[in-house]
DNA sequence: ATGGGCCGCCC
DNA sequence: GTACGGGCGGCCCATC
């Protein structure tokens, strides 16, 4: 039965009229309630809720949200949303939660059918729309839900079709949830309590509220500072462009090309204007100098760096061009109402990591000097500080923990520098000399080779890639890798075991207590390219995914602590192994200590033997 | 308008 | 018979 909660005298006979109080009475002893909202658009601090739907399989209540009084909203909030005993089931909860917060509601105990479905299928090749409610309805309930009506809902009143559509959107969620939970339990991704944060399911269902809050809070961009940096970028870009131009002018082989900066009076006839931002045009010009050059990427071009001065200039151009596009775009993402930037997270990638969209705040430049300046434009409000924490050497510690290699474990236990320790062993040199040049390449230090190796092995790096990365021959690279694995045999055993496990079972999991699963499909025993991929992904998933599990747990614990104590702290960003918060000035130092201990506590859930180190800093801006 | 490819930014 | 894991997106350019 569909109930329509409204003040209207006449309603469609298909529906029953009822009051908020009637509805609350019906839900009194429920443990699951299915929730959805219909809104005027995507959440942007301006769009509004039109309908709020609450229901179970038998009865769906469609509330005309515009007519709800403050008292009625309070009742719904206290008796349903804040009721710990009632699980609120959503499809894509993050969307609705932000709207509900905007109207003064708060929420605990959430289950998201979309997230559960993503967990169940991580790594699988799924078609577009696989996680939509329409698709879930079909798979789990064999029902064809209406997908036309959404978007045709307007604020002029609600037609019967709209109300029926809205009701159906919450009718099947509980059925879907129950079937998903069966699947999740079979894979040990959930236990009887789907909110248990020490299972993957419970972790994600708690984390969705945290990611909603990070998006809702947003992050402040100091606009005038940003414009200053943008000017610096433009100045630099101009210099680089003129440098390119000058070299083209001086190079006889490039006589017929010119760049826009070419002085009009000296321009020769029959010239072609080159857009250096175009890979195709750039390649055409470079082929005049190096007919065999394949593309204009940094990887390829840098091999020609010593052969012609234009190469270095074009590399500079590519980089500064990139920074320029960041500089140009970022201000467009500042919300008109909040004056802050609100990203949109995708909560569960195949490894369990999170990605960030529109804008991607996980790729704000930081490595170069100008990049660092761009990052420092992200600031706290007046009277607040930025407090950030990051896991130090997170992935390397995970390798140490699970390989149990004594060299790695001891390096972390004793707080030594792992790269230097391993470097001395791999190359058989004294630890004091790890920062000296290698015999095969005088511009590369021993320790840098080791660093590349240590990080690369978590990705299943081959001798070809190592050779490419540090510019040595494949034979030299192979010799280094052999020596390295001889020095730390347990690491090799561990990684080989993971690679084999993934290939034989068709899936791989992160460590206990989580065991986040990643499936491998679309391959057969002859498909060597795919098998190579699976092997590398099998090695990487427990490492990268373990990092993701730990960071998500830290976020959930931090969110709880902030709420319970009403701390003046906002979670504002997450970058894989880093968490950023905005904190009232007078509380910043104390918070940095709390944050450090909570992040370490989260890490200890996964790392039992190897210690974790968290670098927590109070700062005036987001920095490296 | 749309979409694929190039290339570079992040961890 | 491959050749480094996980991402996003601006820009160019071909295509419609």
Image: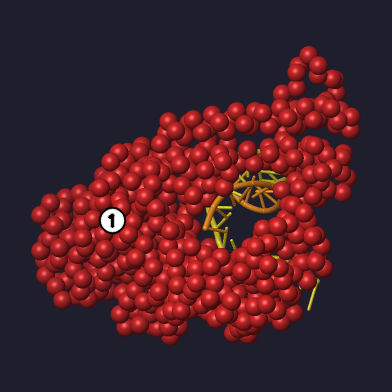
Chain colours: A red, B orange, C yellow
Q: Is residue A183 visible?
A: no
Q: Within 10 angstroms of label 1, few (less than 14), some, or many (20 or more) residues?
A: few
Q: Which residue is mark 1?
A: A590
Picture layout, residue A471 above or below residue C3: above
Q: Position of residue A546 (x, y in %)?
A: 48, 72
Q: Position of residue A20 (x, y in %)?
A: 13, 61
Residue A623 percent across, percent down from the top left: 46, 47
Side (left or right) of A329 relative to A315: left
Q: Chain of mark 1?
A: A
- Front-most of A86 and A286? A286
Measured along the vertical axis of the image, is residue A504 above or below residue A562? below
Q: Could you tell me which residue is drawn at 53 percent across and 79 percent down?
A: A402
Q: Nearer the viewer, residue A53 or A595?
A: A595
Query: Count the marks: how many?
Result: 1
Secondary structure beneath label 1: helix
Picture coordinates of residue A41, whole percent (x, y): 36, 48
Q: Residue A286: tell me if it is visible.
A: yes
Quadrant holding the N terminus of chain A: bottom left
Residue A188, by quadrant, is bottom left
Q: Seen in the image, is A156 located left or right of residue A223? A: left
Residue at the image position 73 percent from the left and 57 percent from the top: A437
Residue sitting at x 22%, y 51%:
A103
Residue under the point 85% across and 20% down: A269
């Amino acid at each position: 039965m569909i109930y329509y909660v409204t003040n209207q005298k006449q309603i469609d006979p298909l529906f029953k009229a009822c009051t908020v109080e009637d509805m609350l009475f019906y839900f009194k002893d429920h443990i699951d309630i299915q929730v959805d909202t219909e809104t005027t658009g995507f959440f942007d601090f301006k769009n509004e809720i039109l309908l709020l739907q609450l229901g179970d399989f038998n009865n769906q209540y469609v509330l005309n949200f515009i007519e709800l009084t403050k008292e009625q909203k309070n009742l719904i909030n206290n008796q349903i949303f804040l009721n710990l005993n009632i699980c609120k089931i959503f499809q894509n909860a993050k969307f609705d939660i932000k709207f509900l917060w905007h109207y003064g509601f708060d929420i605990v105990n959430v289950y998201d059918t979309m997230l559960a479905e993503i967990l169940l299928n991580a790594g699988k090749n799924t078609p577009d729309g696989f996680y939509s409610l329409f698709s879930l309805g079909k798979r789990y309930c064999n029902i064809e839900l209406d997908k036309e009506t959404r978007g045709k809902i307007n604020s002029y009143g609600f037609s019967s079709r709209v109300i029926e559509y809205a009701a159906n959107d919450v009718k099947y969620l509980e059925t879907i949830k129950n079937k998903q939970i069966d699947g999740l339990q079979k894979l040990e991704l959930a236990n009887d309590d789907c909110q248990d944060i020490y299972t993957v399911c419970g972790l994600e269902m708690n984390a969705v509220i945290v990611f909603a809050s990070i998006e809702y809070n947003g992050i402040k961009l100091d606009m005038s500072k940003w414009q200053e940096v943008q000017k610096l970028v433009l100045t630099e870009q101009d210099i680089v462009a003129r440098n390119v131009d000058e070299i083209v002018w001086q190079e006889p082989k490039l006589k017929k090309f010119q760049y826009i900066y070419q002085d009009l009076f000296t321009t020769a006839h029959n010239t072609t204007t080159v857009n250096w931002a175009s890979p195709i045009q750039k390649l055409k010009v470079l082929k005049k100098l190096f007919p065999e050059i394949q593309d204009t990427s940094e990887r390829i071009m840098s091999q020609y760096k010593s052969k012609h001065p234009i190469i270095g200039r074009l590399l500079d151009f590519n980089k500064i061009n990139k920074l320029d596009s960041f500089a140009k775009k970022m201000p467009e993402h500042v919300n008109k109402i909040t004056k802050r930037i609100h990203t949109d997270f995708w909560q569960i990638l195949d490894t369990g990591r999170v990605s960030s969209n529109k804008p991607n705040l996980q790729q704000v430049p930081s490595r170069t000097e100008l990049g660092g300046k761009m990052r420092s434009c992200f600031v706290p409000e007046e009277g607040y500080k930025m407090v950030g924490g990051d896991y130090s050497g997170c992935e390397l510690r995970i390798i140490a923990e699970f390989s149990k290699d004594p060299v790695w474990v001891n390096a972390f236990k004793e707080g030594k520098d792992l790269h230097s320790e391993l470097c001395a062993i791999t190359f058989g040199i004294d630890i004091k000399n790890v920062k000296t040049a290698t015999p095969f390449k005088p511009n590369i230090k021993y320790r840098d080779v080791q660093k590349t190796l240590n990080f690369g092995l978590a990705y299943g790096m081959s001798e070809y890639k190592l050779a490419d990365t540090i510019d040595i021959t494949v034979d030299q690279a192979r010799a280094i890798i052999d020596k390295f694995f001889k020095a730390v045999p347990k690491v090799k055993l561990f990684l080989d075991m993971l690679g084999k496990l993934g290939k034989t079972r068709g899936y791989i999991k992160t460590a206990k207590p989580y065991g986040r699963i990643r499936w491998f499909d679309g391959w057969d025993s002859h498909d060597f390219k795919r098998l190579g991929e699976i092997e590398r992904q099998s090695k990487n998933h427990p490492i990268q995914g373990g990092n993701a599990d730990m960071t998500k747990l830290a976020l959930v614990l931090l969110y709880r602590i902030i709420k319970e104590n009403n701390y003046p702290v906002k979670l504002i960003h997450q970058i894989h192994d880093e968490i950023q918060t905005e904190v009232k000035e007078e509380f910043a130092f104390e918070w940095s200590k709390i944050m450090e201990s909570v992040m370490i506590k989260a890490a200890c859930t996964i790392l039992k033997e190897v210690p974790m180190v968290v670098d927590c800093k109070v700062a005036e801006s987001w920095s490296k």
